[in-house]
Amino acid sequence: MTDSSRHSIAPTSRPSIGLQLPSQLDLSELSSELKNSLPTGTLTDADIAYLQDASAFLMRLGRVLHAQGTSALRLEEALGGCAARLGLRAQLFSTPTSLFIALGDDRVAQTHMVRVDPGEVNLSKLVELDALIDSIGHGTISLRQGFERLDEVANAPHPYPDWLAPVAFGVSSASAAAFFRGNVLDVLVSAILGLGLGALTLWMDRGTATRRIYPALASCLAAAVALALGNHMAVSPSVITVSALIVLVPGLTLTVAMSELATAHLMSGTARFAAAAVTFLQMGLGVGLGRELVHRLLGSTPPTFTSAPLPGFAELTALVLAPFAFAVLFRARRRDIPLIALTSVLGFMGARAGAHLLGPELGAFVGAFVVAAISNWIARLKKRPASITLVPGIMLLVPGSIGFRSLSSFLERDVLTGTEGVFRMFLVAATLVGGLLMANAVFPPRREL
């Protein structure tokens, strides 16, 4: 980052040394410390106050961005761009649970570390944060106003009522059952189970301890109910289990992890990959426990009758409804839902066309390229973050269900099928990342977020 790329947000000149000073010292102590490192008169008290405010703003911005589930690549680019607009040199390092910011040059530098919890994607807040970064860069608001705006964004309520989240869970589960070629009963049972698990999420999110066991508990309940119903109804327990848990399957986390590894964010990618693996193991434990309980208590007596197959338009209906559910789950603004739906549908169609030409695994490359290219084009046109349409659009392509099914195969001692599923999961994730990177190279988004 060169000096020519940095500019001030205020009409008065600012120090060009890219300095961050310890906020716990008063101005006289700061001046004394600086005199040991810098020529006399390099900084005034006003300059020091500005540096304190700017660095505090960056730390607060980084924390809020991290809480919205921003990937390491986008978070570091956004913070680096904001620091440059503030006239500061910044070195950034992000992982899913921490954020390091070093501000300054070779003579004087300060490093700050923030411990954060992994956040959930909130697309509506990302839009507001992107607009705030632009306003700071263009000098239309002061740092004091920036702090106030950051607090407003961080404390803003969800754009949808709480009761709509379980409905979105149910719609996502029903759509997944349709994509997995389930029958009519599979779709209905998956929708009801998804609705119930979504309601359970609202209750278990209230405490840290309950939140940690939720993936295993939800998987146990879904597997037990699906297998128990399979003894008396013409349903597919495997389809119902995967569909009911589709929102919890860490396919997006795995794809983001692969993307971070591919862009040399090795620590963040490795940590996120480990988190996805642990979630898979938790869900596998829950599924195994639920199945074993049903086998021991009820036995296994598959029904001899069959259910009606889905009509031909069922998959198309699922394709239309799924993006709306993802928009609610990712808390997108209502005005962005049409663009999210359009991007998701075109990406899915691109993946199907690519699968027809290149095979089912490599077809994901085409789908990811279409989603990312459209998202980047919309980001340029609307001056919004590309993530607004990219994250929901990629959800229809992520390989989480493949990994979950491979884990189920291992639990059933079908090692060959499980190993094949793991390989397919990594292949699909790699092709998705390849499509995203190719689209970013051909159609750069011109937006950090």
Image (cartoon, helix red, strand yellow):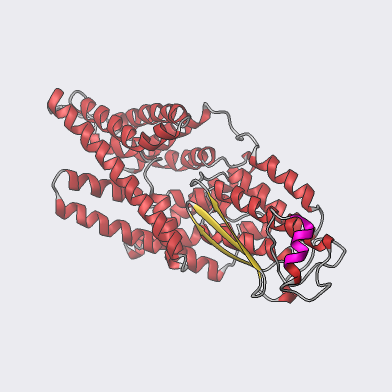
Front-lying residue, 440 or 22: 22
Segment colored magenta: 26-33
Residue 365 appears in view: yes
Residue depicted at x 41% and y 40%: 247
Dominant secondary structure (helix, strand or loop) of the stretch shown in magenta: helix
How far across and how far down the image is residue 320, in percent? 48, 41
Residue depicted at x 38% and y 56%: 273
User: Quadrant where the C terminus lies?
Assistant: bottom right
Residue 87 appears in view: no
Q: Is residue 259 magenta?
A: no
Front-lying residue, 64 or 259: 64
How far across and how far down the image is residue 422, in percent? 26, 56
Front-lying residue, 123 or 366: 123
How far across and how far down the image is residue 88, in percent? 70, 66
How far across and how far down the image is residue 3, in percent? 73, 75
| 226 on left or right of 165 | left
User: Quadrant where the N terminus lies?
Assistant: bottom right
Quarter of the figure with residue 109: bottom right
